[in-house]
């Protein structure tokens, strides 16, 4: 059996790993660590929850330990960039575990915190800087640090960085980096833009892939429930009641809608919290801590936080609003089934979201089992988009908490022969009701249960 000792890591790191309970490397760690220790540029493709942080962090720290003297003022020896504050915090916390008992200094900078204090910390130099691109540019513009001595660059969750529009920020930051460096790129998916990014930033990289990009972890039991947008809140309530006390993560599309949904769940008696772009860094960290410690059972989040949540206790993921980018579905459901555990993921699909579910199934190269309702007819789904957009009324705001649901002028019928509901190990709520429909009656709904969230 392979162990961390067999990878040739520094005894100081191996000792810290043993104390932290790390014994057996994951597949991505087994393949990536030796190559990184050899100084190779590397492109790693692996699903979330497979140990990517240790895969790049351990060999990076191993090489830094050999230097033997502290970094110069305002200088950075290694730069790790991630797209969200939550992911930066997660990486930093892992590195702190790995470096315990060593002289390696890790500094974290993100938006939402004091620029002055971050500048003060960087004035003494850092072995490893973990940063979001926007805040790093702020600090570079203020001459608070220099990257001219940075020998290592890590781009973590690179596909999400591109999805969030950070490509121009990356280009600006790259101008501050020396050409002679080791560059590591890690991603859960491999769109063409990532290939272009790798060709731009990496030199003769070796590619390590432990799972097909875009394929969810096999331990996750998936399902889709077709339901009108206005019925989603009550449907979510029914699902949550089937597993009281178990940690559930709910993904919404908008900040306003996610906040409104959280408040509605609290009013219904659930211990719920929310994280999204309208929350301060302290608020987001406090809510995540409460969720991690069990003070909250339900966390409502937008995609900005999808990859920054590494909590092994999450057993259920609900896609309350379908993601606009199919790859984000993979990242969302990857928040469960972590650290070898199993997990369940349910998607709620409204008529206007048929294109999204079809794009996801195309990415996955498989049909998602139907837990309730039936696929919406093409004419209904098509009519929903121009008339309602993402909202529940013509010309209204996006649904997800911002508009009143529109009435349905006709009784829609499923397109062709509907897919039969498949339980797939994750059944719909136990008692049939207005929000649990199968066959041709799936889209009929019950207006008394239509709660706009």
Image (cartoon, helix red, strand yellow):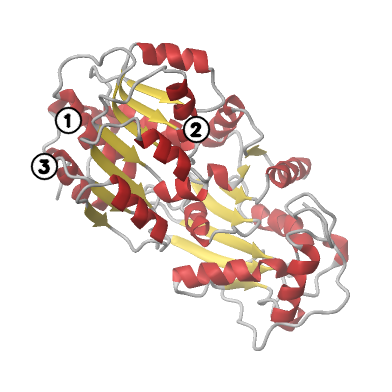
Q: Which mark is residue 63?
A: 1
For disc 1, the neighbor class at 10 Å (few under 14, some 14 to 19, many from 20) is: some
Marks 2 and 1 sit apart, C-alpha to C-alpha, by: 27 Å
Determine contact: label 2, label 1, CB under 8 Å: no
Horizontal side, residue 265 vs residue 176: left or right: right
Front position among marks 2 and 3: 2
**Lower sequence index among marks 3 and 1:** 3
The front one of 4 and 45 is 45
Q: Secondary structure at mark 1?
A: helix
Horizontal side, residue 187 vs residue 440: left or right: left
For image coordinates 54% across by 69% down, the residue present is 359
Residue 110 picture location, percent across and down: 49, 28
Q: Which residue is mark 3?
A: 6
Marks 2 and 3 sit apart, C-alpha to C-alpha, by: 39 Å
For disc 3, the neighbor class at 10 Å (few under 14, some 14 to 19, many from 20) is: few
**Lower sequence index among marks 2 and 3:** 3
Is residue 60 placed above or below 47 in the rendered structure?
A: above
Asked if residue 78 can be seen in this view, the reply is yes
For image coordinates 41% across by 56% down, the residue present is 193
Is residue 59 placed above or below 2 in the rendered structure?
A: above
Q: Which residue is mark 2?
A: 134
Residue 133 picture location, percent across and down: 45, 34
Q: Secondary structure at mark 3?
A: helix
Residue 139 picture location, percent across and down: 45, 22
The front one of 338 and 29 is 29
Marks 3 and 1 sit apart, C-alpha to C-alpha, by: 17 Å
For image coordinates 63% across by 48% down, the residue present is 244
Asked if residue 191 can be seen in this view, the reply is no
**Lower sequence index among marks 2 and 1:** 1
Front position among marks 2 and 1: 2
The front one of 308 and 107 is 107
Quadrant of res 99: top left
């Amino acid at each position: 059996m392979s162990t961390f000792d067999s990878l040739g890591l520094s005894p100081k790191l191996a000792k810290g790993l043993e104390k932290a309970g790390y014994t057996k490397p994951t597949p991505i760690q087994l393949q990536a660590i030796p190559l990184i220790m050899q100084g190779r540029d590397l492109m790693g493709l692996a699903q979330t929850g497979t140990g990517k942080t240790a895969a790049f962090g351990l060999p990076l720290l191993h090489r830094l330990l050999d230097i033997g003297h502290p970094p110069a003022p305002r200088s950075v020896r290694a730069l790790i960039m991630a797209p969200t504050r939550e992911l930066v915090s997660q990486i930093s916390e892992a590195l702190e575990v790995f470096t315990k008992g060593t002289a390696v200094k890790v500094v974290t900078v993100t938006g939402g915190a004091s620029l002055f204090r971050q500048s003060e910390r960087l004035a003494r130099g850092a072995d490893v800087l973990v940063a979001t691109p926007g805040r790093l540019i702020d600090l570079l513009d203020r001459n608070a640090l220099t990257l001219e001595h940075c020998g290592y660059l890590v781009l973590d969750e690179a596909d999400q960085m591109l999805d969030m529009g950070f490509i121009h920020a990356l280009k600006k930051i790259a101008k501050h980096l020396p050409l002679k460096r080791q560059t590591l790129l890690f991603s859960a998916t491999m769109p063409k833009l990532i290939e272009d990014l790798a060709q731009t930033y990496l030199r003769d990289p070796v590619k390590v892939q432990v799972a097909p990009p875009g394929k969810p972890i096999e331990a996750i039991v998936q399902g889709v429930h077709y339901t009108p947008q206005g019925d989603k809140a009550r449907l979510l309530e029914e699902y949550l009641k089937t597993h009281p006390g178990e940690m559930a993560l709910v993904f919404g599309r908008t900040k306003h809608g996610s906040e409104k949904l959280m408040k509605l769940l609290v009013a219904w008696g659930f211990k719920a919290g929310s994280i999204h772009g309208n929350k301060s860094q302290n608020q987001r960290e406090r809510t995540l801590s409460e969720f991690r410690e069990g003070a909250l059972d339900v966390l409502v989040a937008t995609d900005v936080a999808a990859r920054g949540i590494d909590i092994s206790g999450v057993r259920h993921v609900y896609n309350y609003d379908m993601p606009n980018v199919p790859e984000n579905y993979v990242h969302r459901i990857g928040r469960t089934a972590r650290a070898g555990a199993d997990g369940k993921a349910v998607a709620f699909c409204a008529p206007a979201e048929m294109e999204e579910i079809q794009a996801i199934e195309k990415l996955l190269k498989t049909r998602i089992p139907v837990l309730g309702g039936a696929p919406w007819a093409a004419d209904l789904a098509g009519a929903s988009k121009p008339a309602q957009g993402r909202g529940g009324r013509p010309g209204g705001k996006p649904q997800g908490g911002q508009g009143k649901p529109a009435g349905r002028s006709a009784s829609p019928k499923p397109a062709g022969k509907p897919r039969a509901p498949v339980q797939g190990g994750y059944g719909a709520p136990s008692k049939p009701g207005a929000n649990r429909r199968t066959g041709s009656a799936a889209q009929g709904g019950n207006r008394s249960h239509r709660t706009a969230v």
